[in-house]
Image (spheres, rainbow, N blue to C red):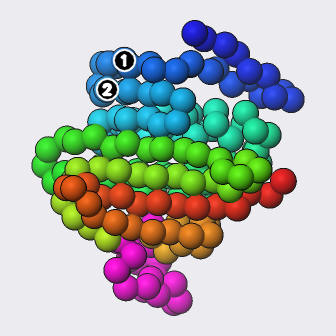
Amino acid sequence: MEENIHIDDIEVFHLGADRTERTEDFMIEQDEDSITVEAVEDALYPVQEFIDQKLLRFGYFGRDLYMIRLAVEEVFINICSYAYQSSIGTAKISCRLDGDVSNLILRFADSGIPFNPLEQAEADTSGVQFMEREGGFGIHLVKKIMDKISYEYKDGKNYLVLEKKLRT
């Protein structure tokens, strides 16, 4: 089932539930609460669209949406770049709004090599060295954007959970 949702001057294309497709470059499997894609950088766009649809449906846009998109990009690109080394695996991103739909919970799951980003040293954002660094700033940025982050490695999978209290 396809439907277009209009929110103010924004038109959101809603894809419906239980959708699976293979594009020229990667696989997408989607239902109401999650999207599973091959962990390739080109799959970032459908992941972002999935999150956008969920948040726009409940009236979240502007700064909240922008900041969440930035956090999702950082986590997803890290999975694409590092989780599977030279092979291509999948990433599953679940998106829930709990309580009075003001608490966002994003859950990233992958079967890549175990990696707890929360165990990494805090990024030193002072001075010129920061601007010259390659990498290492993404998790710092995600920590600043989100209210709570947790990690677990279980049954051969990495689970990174991001939570954000959204402004109503």
Asked if the residue under mark 1 is in contact with the one under mark 2, i.e. CB atoms within 8 Å, the reply is yes
Nearest the camera: 74 or 161? 161
Which quadrant of the rendered structure holds the N terminus? top right
In the rendered image, the vertical position of residue 132 relative to residue 86, given as above or below: below
Amino acid type of the residue tagged 1 in the rendering: Glu
Circle 2 sits on which residue? 27
- The residue at the point 52 percent across, 61 percent down is 162
Q: CA distance from mark 2 to mark 1?
A: 6 Å
Does 45 appear in magenta? Answer: no
Residue 136 sits in quarter:
bottom left
Q: Which residues are magenta?
A: 117-138
In the rendered image, the vertical position of residue 38 relative to residue 82, given as above or below: above
Tell me where residue 145 appears, x and y as whole percent. 61, 66
Mark number for residue 9? none
- The residue at the point 53 percent across, 89 percent down is 126
Tell me where residue 87 appears, x and y as whole percent. 14, 44
> Circle 1 — which element?
strand
Circle 1 sits on which residue? 21
Tell me where residue 106 appears, x and y as whole percent. 52, 52
Residue neighbourhood size for the residue with mark 2, other residues' Cα within 10 Å, grouped as few (<14), some (14–19), many (≥20): some
In the rendered image, the vertical position of residue 17 relative to residue 168, given as above or below: above
Nearest the camera: 154 or 115? 154
Residue 105 sits in quarter:
bottom right
Mark 2 vs 1, N-terminal side: 1
- The residue at the point 22 percent across, 64 percent down is 114
In the picture as drawn, the residue positioned furthest to the top comes out as: 1
Q: Is residue 88 left or right of residue 117?
A: left
